[in-house]
Image (cartoon, rainbow, N blue to C red):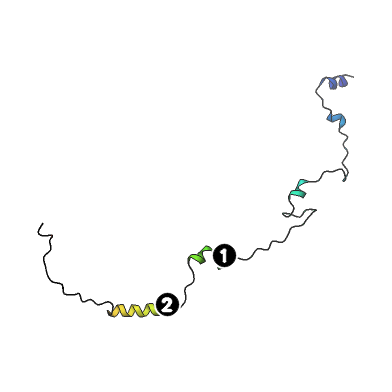
Amino acid sequence: QPKEDLLRLTYTTTTGSSYLGRQIDKNDRTESFQEIFAVGQRRTKYMGVSLRLAPLLDRSSCNYTTDFAKKPLGDNIQNSHMAKVFKNGAGPSKNLPNLPAGQSTYGEE
């Protein structure tokens, strides 16, 4: 009898009397939200994972290609010819025109 009195005097909840300890049937169970929200990201009961096919990257997919475009070959022939011409001194003429020797107005001030 004292154990029953002690149980009545202490704090109790209704969970102890209402919880039967049986498992819920499959039809009564709620659905996992991960099955709904993860559709397409992982294999769920509604849909599997779709195969991701992304195009491969090549040279045209970078901004570098537009900034530094390919140059045509054969430019080195012209550059070597111009280097020979400038090395031999056949560049622009070095003869200066004969100017009359005069005095500047700078010295008068």
Residue closer to the observer: 81 or 102: 102
The secondary structure type at the circle numbered 1 is helix
Residue 97 or 76: which is nearer the viewer?
97
Mark 1: few, some, or many residues within 10 Å (few <14, many ≥20)? few
Q: In the figure, 48 relative to 101: above or below?
A: above
In the image, residue 103 lies at what x, y percent?
11, 65
Q: Residue at x 34, y 77 (%)?
A: 83
Considering depth in this image, is 107 or 42 the residue closer to the camera? 107
Crowding at label 2, few (<14), some or many (≥20) Cα neighbours within 10 Å? few
Compared with 93, 36 (above or below) is above
Q: Is residue 46 above or below residue 13?
A: below
Q: Quadrant of residue 74?
A: bottom left
- Tell me the CA gap for discs 2 and 1: 27 Å
For marks 2 and 1, the one nearer the N-term is: 1
Residue at image position (84%, 22%) is 7
Work out which quarter of the rendered image holds the N terminus and state it: top right
Q: Which mark is residue 81?
A: none
Residue 12 % position (x, y):
82, 25
Seen at 30% across and 77% down, the residue is 86
The residue singled out by tag 1 in the image is 61
Rendering coords of residue 5 (x, y %): 86, 19
Q: Quadrant of residue 60?
A: bottom right
Q: Is residue 82 left or right of residue 39?
A: left
User: What type is the residue that disc 1 sits on?
Assistant: Ser
Secondary structure under the numbered disc 2 in the rendered image: helix
Residue drawn where x is 51% and y is 64% of the image = 64
Residue labelled with disc 2:
75
The x, y position of residue 44, in whole percent, is 78, 53
Q: Amino acid at mark 2?
A: Asp
Q: Are marks 2 and 1 in contact (CB under 8 Å)?
A: no
Residue farthest to the left? 108
Q: Quadrant of the C terminus?
A: bottom left
